[in-house]
């Protein structure tokens, strides 16, 4: 291991600009002549627009344009799309209602976009928006998922008269029912997976710009995947053809999924730039972010686990209602289906699984992928069920898990996935050791003496990352391929630029990707630049989500580097007057086997460009290679997290006393960065378990639309974490990487709730387990104890 | 419009501003010092923290005109030329940042904590004192380590120790 190669905890190259205030986020950019957009949003959850009069707003001094859904229609601008087709049990396609970027006759959630005012300043735009006269006829709001599909519920989209987007299933129902019929014990649970708001600290922003001379558009935007944004904006929404649309995603302040999607505001800014003939800038404020960023989770689930007389798992049965909000966001349809049900086998050998999912429209903000996307929801189901089952049959939860772990690989689950490799017991053993499981009894007694309740909870999670083999996801309904591309440009002086379709918005790619190059080419990371986030520079890319940038994005870079080295060998052969077959490349030098003749990478790069030693007929000059990498399988990171809590039953305050994470991410490029990803993921998972919850009231108003009402995890809500790992290299990609970005958020929620329910001695605690909820649950525990 | 004069990062600036201009807007839009970020509307996240006359304030809820005559330091003014402030260096060394959006406010708040609480800070103190700053990326684990190390490095004579 060199000090900057694979496996080294290299300090991040990108940090200097961030710690000195020189990061460049979208809102930091100012374009000449730029105007400011303000969106008038619906105050109602569900209403038809009888009349919309913008004339007074338009007449306001300083206003340069007011645009509505009618203008979009007149220009033939298409609606926002959902890029993953799901078919219901009966074979019918999902019911996707139209999703115009500005409302056309109807609004479907509080925050829905009614009109945009574009003005010299934001203050003028805001003031003018108040002069827009909207005549709403309110309709009954559909907020509750259970009521949404019931008789008499108002219809949100005419295409879905029962507000069901789809009624989908996966697995073998007959086999599952048969296994349940012969089960010795069945554990049943009803679970709520609370609705979350992703809340990257940088809110979304966009600047649309139009160059009339070239009839070309530029969009600066807070995107995790600028090429996908360009593809959707051109091919589906019809703003401009791809070669006339440049999308730039500069520094992006966190995404967590919420910046994957193509939203109304970005679409409108780029379209409006041509309408008003000036750049149009919009920056979301935090309340707008709460109202209009795609939310996450929001499931109601009934789950059952069947066991035989020895506590061996026989089958699992799951029914989930998934709230998809008022419109189908870009990838929303696949999150509670193909990113969810295929993970229900967890780390366990379960012969039969059957899962049904109803996707449901409500008059709430669209729901889509949020860190983990489907996999945290699945893990919550599996790990709560498993924990409760162990408790019900009186087995130690660690031993019960161990008994049911998959041990032979590859392992085909009954729900699509073929796990390639793993050693779940190794992670569990290490975790038990690090948390001092043996000392738990003593610690519980110590807490009890102080009047406190102590509990410990496990979460043995698995995720499917590195998303994903294109043909496989295509057969499941994906509208795109999920490969990644890379281009490696060796420069004449031996420095290297890597152009990648992965996007970095906190993950540290500028460092880890450079480490790979340093490792392979034997050059310093300071001689490597990572270029990303601009469709004019990078040819194509599928972007960053699903913990795919290492496993897929870096694999593409590795492939391109192999080609560069192969080309370098050809060049070196001419330069060293040897045959190509005799050239070896090692530690940054091309050498002739068995001799002391060699050239450094930089010298070969120079030879490649000056092209003095070979003719153009023999070899093309230059040292630039590209590659597309399409994965052959998902990757399967896994691990065991253990959370230990101490609860004060008098106040209901839950203190996380210890946290141990033992993850298997395969090969790790930069352990410092990987651990940081784990920390951040756990914090978001703890946020879901203890603090966060997006709540709509019965009229469809989001009552948690600011940091006053939506409780974000803060430093004093969290402990320091003990993070360790085990390693089984991933066999399906050249680097052995599995992915680490989502693990913490996937693992954490059931670990916390399992710990709290262990402390309380009953299972009746829902997320978020706020002090009030835990206090109530502690009261119930006391009553149950008294009744015994 | 109102005239406001203040010293920002050691330079005197005078501008005519709408009286409702916030200090965050003033430094970002008028002075184009975009290291100071805005992450919320309710004075909760701390992305906007700057120092006014040596004390941390949330510039998103401070009127620019109220800083007339004051000395303001933003993240851009913290380093001594090319030499990082010890707290900046500690954030890099301890991986106290990921997306970098909360980072300027975190660093400015951290320096203020040290100014108030001294150079030896325990984890509990740091976590409590960071109450006004939200980070969505790091889970705070490495921020806490960075602040602890940065505090020590800010002590007089600490550079000699660090250089050993
Ligand atoms: S922007 Fe000032 S506290 Fe959030
Ligand atoms: S580093 Fe992204 S919010 Fe703190």
Image: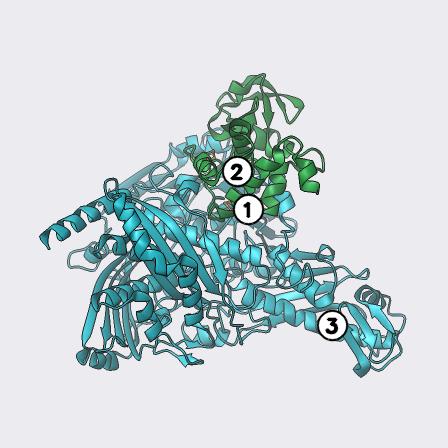
- Is the residue at mark 1 from the same chain as the one at mark 2? yes
Name which residue lies at 62% across and 33% down.
B154
Whether disc 2's CB lies below 8 Å from ligand 2 is answered yes
Mark 1 residue's CB less than 8 Å from ligand 2: yes
The residues bearing labels 3 and 1 have C-alpha atoms spaced at a distance of: 34 Å
Q: Which chain is cyan?
A: A
Mark in front: 3 vs 1 = 1
State the image coordinates of residue B157 (x, y, percent, origin top left): 67, 32
Q: Where is A117 relative to B137, above or below? A: above
Q: Which residue is mark 1?
A: B97
**Pointer 3: what residue?**
A565
Asked if the residue at tag 2 contacts the one at tag 1, i.e. Cβ–Cβ closer than 8 Å, the answer is yes
Q: Is residue A226 visible?
A: no
**Display colour for chain B:** green
What is the chain letter for disc 2? B
| Label 3 C-beta lies within 8 Å of the nearest ligand 2 atom | no
Which mark, residue B106? 2
Whole-number angstrom distance, CA of label 1 to CA of label 2:
9 Å
Give the CA separation, mark 2 to mark 3.
Answer: 43 Å
Q: Position of residue A442 (x, y in %)?
A: 31, 54
Q: Chain of mark 3?
A: A
Identity of the residue furthest to the left in this view = A787
The answer to whether residue B141 is visible is yes
């Amino acid at each position: 291991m060199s000090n900057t190669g694979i496996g080294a905890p290299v300090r991040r190259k990108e940090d200097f600009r961030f710690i000195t205030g020189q990061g460049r986020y979208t809102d930091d950019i100012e374009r000449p002549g730029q105007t400011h957009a303000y969106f008038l949003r619906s105050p109602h959850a569900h209403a038809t627009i009888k009349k919309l009069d913008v004339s007074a707003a338009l007449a306001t001094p300083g206003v340069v344009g007011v645009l509505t859904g009618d203008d979009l229609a007149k220009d033939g601008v298409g609606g926002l799309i959902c890029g993953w087709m799901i078919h219901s049990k009966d074979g019918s396609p999902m019911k996707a209602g139209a999703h115009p970027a500005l409302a056309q006759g109807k609004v479907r959630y509080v925050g829905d976009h009614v009109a945009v005012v574009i003005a010299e300043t934001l203050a003028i735009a805001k003031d003018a928006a108040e002069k827009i006269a909207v005549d709403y006829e309110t309709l009954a709001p559909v907020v509750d998922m259970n009521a949404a599909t019931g008789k008499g519920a108002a219809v949100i989209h005419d295409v879905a008269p029962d507000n069901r987007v789809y009624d989908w299933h996966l697995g073998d129902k007959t086999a599952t029912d048969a296994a349940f019929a012969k089960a010795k014990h069945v554990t049943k649970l009803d679970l709520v997976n609370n609705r979350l708001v992703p809340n990257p600290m940088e809110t979304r922003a966009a600047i649309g710009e139009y160059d009339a001379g070239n009839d070309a558009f530029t969009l600066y935007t807070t995107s995790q995947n600028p090429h996908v944004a360009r593809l959707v904006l051109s091919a589906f929404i019809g703003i401009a053809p791809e070669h006339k649309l440049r999308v730039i995603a500069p520094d992006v302040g966190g995404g967590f999924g919420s910046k994957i999607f193509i939203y109304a505001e970005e679409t409108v800014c780029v379209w409006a730039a041509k309408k008003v003939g000036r750049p149009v800038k919009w920056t979301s404020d935090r309340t707008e972010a709460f109202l209009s960023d795609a939310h996450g989770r929001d499931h109601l689930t009934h789950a059952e686990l069947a066991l035989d007389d020895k506590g061996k798992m026989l089958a699992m049965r799951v029914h989930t209602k998934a709230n998809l909000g008022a419109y189908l966001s870009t990838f929303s349809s696949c999150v509670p289906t193909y990113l969810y049900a295929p993970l229900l086998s967890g780390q366990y050998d379960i012969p039969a699984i059957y899962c049904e999912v109803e996707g449901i429209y409500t008059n709430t903000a669209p729901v889509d992928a949020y860190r983990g996307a489907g996999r945290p929801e699945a893990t919550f189901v599996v790990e709560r069920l498993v924990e409760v089952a162990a408790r019900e049959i009186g087995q130690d939860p660690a031993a019960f898990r161990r008994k049911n772990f998959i041990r032979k690989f590859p392992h085909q689950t009954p729900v699509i996935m073929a796990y390639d490799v793993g050693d779940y017991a190794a992670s569990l053993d290490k975790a038990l050791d690090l948390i001092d499981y043996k000392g738990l009894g003593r610690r519980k007694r110590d807490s009890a003496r102080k009047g406190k309740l102590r509990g410990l909870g496990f979460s043995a999670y698995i995720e499917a990352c590195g998303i994903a083999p294109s043909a496989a996801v295509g057969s499941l309904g994906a509208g795109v391929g999920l490969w990644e591309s890379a281009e490696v440009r060796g420069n004449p002086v031996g420095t290297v630029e890597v152009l990648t379709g992965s996007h970095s918005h906190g993950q540290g790619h500028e460092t880890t990707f450079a480490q790979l190059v340093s490792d392979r080419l034997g050059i310093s990371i300071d001689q490597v630049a990572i270029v990303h986030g601009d469709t004019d520079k990078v040819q194509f890319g599928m972007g960053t989500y699903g913990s795919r940038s290492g496993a897929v994005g870096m694999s593409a870079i590795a492939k391109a580097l192999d080609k560069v080295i192969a080309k370098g060998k050809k060049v070196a052969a001419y330069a060293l007057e040897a045959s190509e077959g005799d050239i070896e490349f090692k530690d940054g030098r091309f050498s002739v086997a068995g001799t002391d003749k060699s050239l450094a990478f930089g010298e070969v790069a120079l030879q490649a460009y000056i092209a003095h030693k070979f003719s153009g007929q023999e070899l093309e000059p230059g040292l630039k290679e590209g590659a597309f990498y399409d994965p052959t399988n998902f990757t399967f990171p896994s691990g065991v997290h253990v959370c230990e809590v101490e609860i004060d039953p008098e106040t209901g305050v839950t203190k996380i006393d210890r946290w141990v994470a033992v993850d298997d991410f395969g090969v790790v490029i930069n352990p410092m960065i990987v651990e940081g990803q784990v920390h951040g993921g756990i914090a978001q998972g703890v946020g879901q378990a203890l603090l966060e919850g997006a709540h709509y009231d019965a009229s469809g108003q989001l009552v948690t639309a600011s940091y006053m009402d939506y409780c974000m995890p803060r430093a004093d809500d969290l402990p320091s974490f003990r993070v360790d790992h085990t390693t089984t290299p991933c066999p399906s990609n050249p680097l052995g990487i599995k992915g680490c970005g989502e693990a913490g958020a996937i693992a954490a929620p059931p670990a916390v709730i399992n710990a709290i329910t262990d402390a309380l001695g009953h299972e009746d605690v829902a997320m978020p387990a706020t002090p009030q909820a835990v206090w109530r649950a502690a009261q119930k525990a006391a009553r149950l104890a008294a009744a015994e | 419009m109102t005239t406001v004069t203040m010293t920002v990062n050691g330079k005197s600036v005078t501008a005519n501003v709408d009286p409702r201009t916030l200090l965050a807007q003033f430094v970002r839009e008028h002075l184009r010092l975009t290291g100071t970020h805005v992450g919320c509307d309710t004075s909760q996240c701390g992305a906007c923290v700057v120092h006014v006359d040596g004390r941390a304030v949330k510039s998103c809820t401070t009127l620019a005109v109220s800083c007339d005559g004051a000395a303001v330091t933003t993240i851009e003014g913290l380093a001594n030329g090319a030499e990082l402030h010890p707290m900046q260096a500690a954030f890099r060394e301890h991986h106290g940042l990921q997306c970098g959006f909360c980072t300027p406010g975190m660093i400015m708040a951290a320096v203020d904590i040290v100014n108030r609480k001294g150079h030896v800070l325990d984890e509990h103190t740091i976590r409590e004192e960071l109450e006004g700053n939200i980070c969505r990326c790091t889970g705070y684990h490495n921020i806490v380590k960075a602040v602890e190390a940065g505090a020590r490095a800010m002590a007089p004579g600490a550079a000699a120790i660090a250089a050993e």
